[in-house]
Amino acid sequence: MAAVVAVALSFPSMAPSPYELTVGIAIVNYAVLSTSWNFVGGFTGYISLGHGAFAGLGAYTTALLVTKADLPSFAALFVSAALVAVLAVPVGYAALRVRGASFVIVSIALVLIMLLVFQSWSSFTGGSRGLVVPRPFPGMLRSEHHEVFYFLFLALLAVALLTWWIIDRSRFGMGLKAIREDEDKAQSLGTPTYTYKLVVFVVSATFTALAGGLYGLWFGDLDPVFQFSILSGAYMVLMALLGGVRHLYGPLLGAVIVGYGLEYSKLEYGDTPLHLVFAGLLLGVVVMFMPDGVIPAATGLIARVFKTGETSIREVTAAELREERGQGGAEPAPGSPGQKREVKQ
């Protein structure tokens, strides 16, 4: 981990050109988005393909607060995240009443509704013309601008990972994982499943909005077709699934692999849909060969090779047990405490 942190912190100085730095920013942004999605997908097992709506709302709300309300850039960022969190409460209240495929359909409907609203309301949002966001650091050179935002995205990723880690080790996280394994049983045992789902849904939406707002301030030009795209939510799911949704660093690893692949295919093949082919093939490989993700598959392989996962309980046959008892004394009666202790040993 120390080596990974060192590489991440020194990446801007190692990047050979501003383009490589922008690719690094895009990958860290993907990592924040997939980690934010993993609050819902990893803990509860609910698959949302419409999480890109919260990123788009964060970006557009931040931009509108800067351009229309004259708020400072980063004040607008946090205010927009708070507004998206408030909006996520009624959205989650309605969406989390259904499960499985129904929840997926509701999440897709959310992003399509947002796309329709922000594309049609051109007098306020700019519509298909887009919306230009003023740069928060107008006096900086472009390379310095990229470097500052790289570290801002990295700090946001660190906060998201820390929050996920804290929830994973809390009683609240245990309740969320119980929902993922068997929601009906968890509810019957007294877990407030609906409240837990709603809370983590709002937390996920907040981090997603922060990532979207920070992207808007960095990139400076918003387009509703791009911001409210189903592909954004699909990429979040793919990255988390690739790395491992039940692992803290799963979405991060998936973001590095998928993000680099997407950026490379766009560079090599331009605006052709070949990057979508790459994403589809990668998803097929994950589903067929690594359904739990790269990290669980790698740790399982290491455990099999080095036999680190062997149990400390030694299995013996009845004949071996009788022989051992014969060497040490009389065999206890079936069901006696002595026999139970021997079986455990």
Image (cartoon, grey):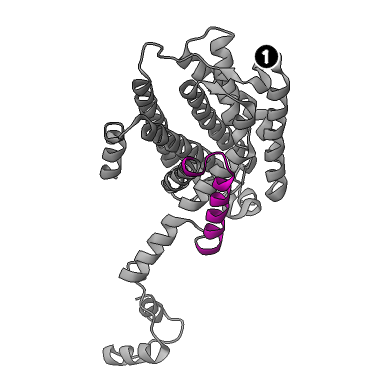
Residue that badge 1 annotates: 124
In the visual, does 253 lie left or right of 174?
left
Q: Amino acid at mark 1?
A: Phe
Residue for point 54% across, 28% down: 209
Residue for point 49% across, 52% down: 242
Residue for point 44% across, 14% down: 136
Q: Quadrant of the N terminus?
A: top left
Give coordinates of residue 32: x percent, y percent: 46, 36
Tally the numbered discs.
1
Give coordinates of residue 108: x percent, y percent: 69, 39
Q: Is 332 or 186 nearer to us in this picture? A: 186
Residue lying at the far top in this picture: please name it: 70
- Picture layout, residue 135 above or below residue 339: above
Residue for point 47% across, 10% down: 72
Q: Quadrant of the C terminus?
A: bottom left
Q: Is 317 or 44 nearer to us in this picture? A: 44
Q: Is residue 122 magenta?
A: no
Task: Please provide the residue range marked out in magenta.
Answer: 267-289
- Picture layout, residue 320 above or below residue 144: below
- Picture layout, residue 244 above or below residue 33: below
